[in-house]
Image: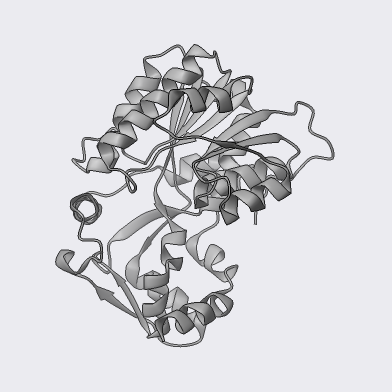
Amino acid sequence: MSKYIKPESTEHQLEVLVTGATGNQGGAVARKLIDRGHTVRVFTRKPESYKAKQLEKLGAVVYKGDFEDVLTIENAMEGVDAVFAMTTPYERGVRSEVKQGFLLGKTANSLRIKHFVYSSVSNADKHSGIPHFKSKYEIEKFVINTDINYTIIRPTYFMENFLNPQMLSKINEGILTLPMIPERNLQMISIETIADFVVYILEHRENFLKQSIDIASDSIAGNEVANILSEINGHKIEYVRLSYDQISSKSDYVIKMYKWLNEIGFDVDIQSLHKRYPEISWPRFDEWAKHRQWNDIRKPIMQKVI
């Protein structure tokens, strides 16, 4: 789906440390870098995990470490050309996320890393009151106030959220559930597109230094998503809005996020963004969804549910 085609040879091969590489976003960035001929280091607490081993088979060098252990961060980071950094509140909370980001930024600064790309979240700087938006903005501010040659990307809602097992099991039953107003547009982007853009940034470093860029591919309402999935899957899928109390995690920051998305929402200038970077494909949701193997994905999930 990407328009950003691999050249016959990479003029300037990079060595890049990718954090979060055993997750979806970091993994996509790592694989894309490897595919384009770059050297990739992977930083993970679980080098024996299946995803780490798969990246190792592709050619990545796996470093064992912890986001809160500066010595292991230094060991993995020393000597690289660039760092792709991402942080998460989902394992240890937002306070830990801020600490992770500070340590990654501080280490990159002390080692004089040439390029530090941090993946934040769209509108992190808009005082939304969402805890995991605020934590990422704290990291942004820290990075900006160092001497690091940084680029900050701010993705919107992930299209891949529709592929999580709980949502897919409901789709199998003919229901798409979200705590969003049915007609309320939600800006979104695929993880593959994020990876394309990150690699493009890394390969065109001089054009992106000291910039923060909000990114999205499409803006689409929940009822439209249900219609698209109905057509692709060959059966009627009804959109059902969840109450905030019905959100499976019921975590405070997830509830606050959906309230904000309903009342305010992301505000990426999608048309200008796509015009500015025509090298990236920026697929719409329907284009992305058509390339997913929904039938293949459904089978193991149905077995789990049963």
Which one is nearer the viewer's eye here, 288 or 42? 42
Which one is nearer the viewer's eye here, 100 or 83? 100
* Residue 221 percent location from the top left of the image: 34, 64
* Residue 268 percent location from the top left of the image: 38, 43
Place residue 128 in its image quadrant.
top left
Q: Who's the residue at 41% across and 14% down the image?
A: 146
Q: Which quarter shows the N terminus?
A: bottom right
Q: From this viewpoint, is residue 184 visible?
A: yes
Measured along the vertical axis of the image, is residue 233 above or below residue 112?
Answer: below
Q: How is the image coloured?
A: one colour
Q: Which quarter shows the C terminus?
A: bottom left
Measured along the vertical axis of the image, is residue 111 above or below residue 24?
Answer: above
* Residue 237 percent location from the top left of the image: 38, 82
Q: Is residue 189 left or right of residue 244?
A: right
Q: Who's the residue at 40% across and 82% down the image?
A: 305
Q: Who's the residue at 33% across and 68% down the image?
A: 222
Q: From this viewpoint, is residue 232 visible?
A: no
* Residue 292 percent location from the top left of the image: 57, 69
